[in-house]
Image: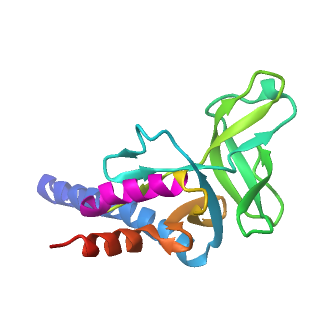
Amino acid sequence: MNGKNRHILIFALVALIQLYVPAKMIWNQESILEGGKEYKFKTAPIDPNDPFRGKYITLTFEENTYKVTGGMEWARGDEVYVLLTTNASGFAEIDSVSKQIPNVQQDFIKAKVWFVSDNDENKLTIDYPFNRFYMEESKAYDAEVTYRQSQVDTSKTAYALVRIKNGDAVLKDVLIDGVPIREIVKKEQSKNKP
């Protein structure tokens, strides 16, 4: 094999690898959306000064703390496995948190420890991998305002719809009182058009 053919072969291999990696990532996300179990994570109010960065809504969740024994064994950034259950209202709740991959047939999420309280409460604050909801640029600002208003209005329930499969999670949608935020924004924008 001469040098020119070798360069062509190497180029073709590199090109295939570059196509394979993003295709595999997309396939994994689609697999979770298609075959994962759906959970509703109730969102919590956030600091109104920084709720939106770029083209996504920053989400925080009510169910993001868990009391553990031995608070000194946990550190910020630790990878953890959050085992889930569902409460009577249909929202996700933390059943337990572990540093080892669960060997039970219960849904779990791979997450990270965001904070460990040091005041003898031994509470972990969980940093979920689905805390950003991306939007079209034309709807981003209106979605931010709508989401922020839903967090202030106690009569409204805002939650994230998340699909979970084998520890991986994909944020499917953000809903307010059961209506996707995209639909709310689209309806508001069509009412305000001249």
Q: Residue at x 44, y 67 (%)?
A: 181
Q: Is residue 164 above or below residue 102?
A: below
Q: Main secondary structure of the magenta part?
A: helix
3 or 43, nearer to the observer: 43
The picture places residue 21, in percent across and down from the top left corner, at 39, 59
146 or 39, nearer to the observer: 146
Q: Residue at x 27, y 74 (%)?
A: 191
Residue 142 sits in which quadrant?
A: bottom left
Q: Answer left or right for 78 relative to 55.
A: right
- Which residue is at the far right? 69
Q: Residue at x 41, y 39 (%)?
A: 50
The picture places residue 159, in percent across and down from the top left corner, at 58, 62
The picture places residue 185, in percent across and down from the top left corner, at 35, 68
Q: Residue at x 62, y 72 (%)?
A: 36
- Which residue is at the far left? 4
Q: Answer left or right for 178 relative to 21.
A: right
- Which residue is at the far bottom? 34
Q: Is residue 130 visible?
A: no
Residue 164 sits in which quadrant?
A: bottom right
The picture places residue 8, in percent across and down from the top left corner, at 17, 59
Q: Answer left or right for 122 relative to 41.
A: right
Q: Which residues are magenta?
A: 136-151
11 or 101, nearer to the observer: 101
Q: Quadrant of the C terminus?
A: bottom left
Residue 170 highlighted magenta (yes or no): no
Q: Is residue 131 above or below residue 135?
A: above
Residue 93 sits in which quadrant?
A: bottom right
Residue 145 highlighted magenta (yes or no): yes
Q: Is residue 11 visible?
A: yes
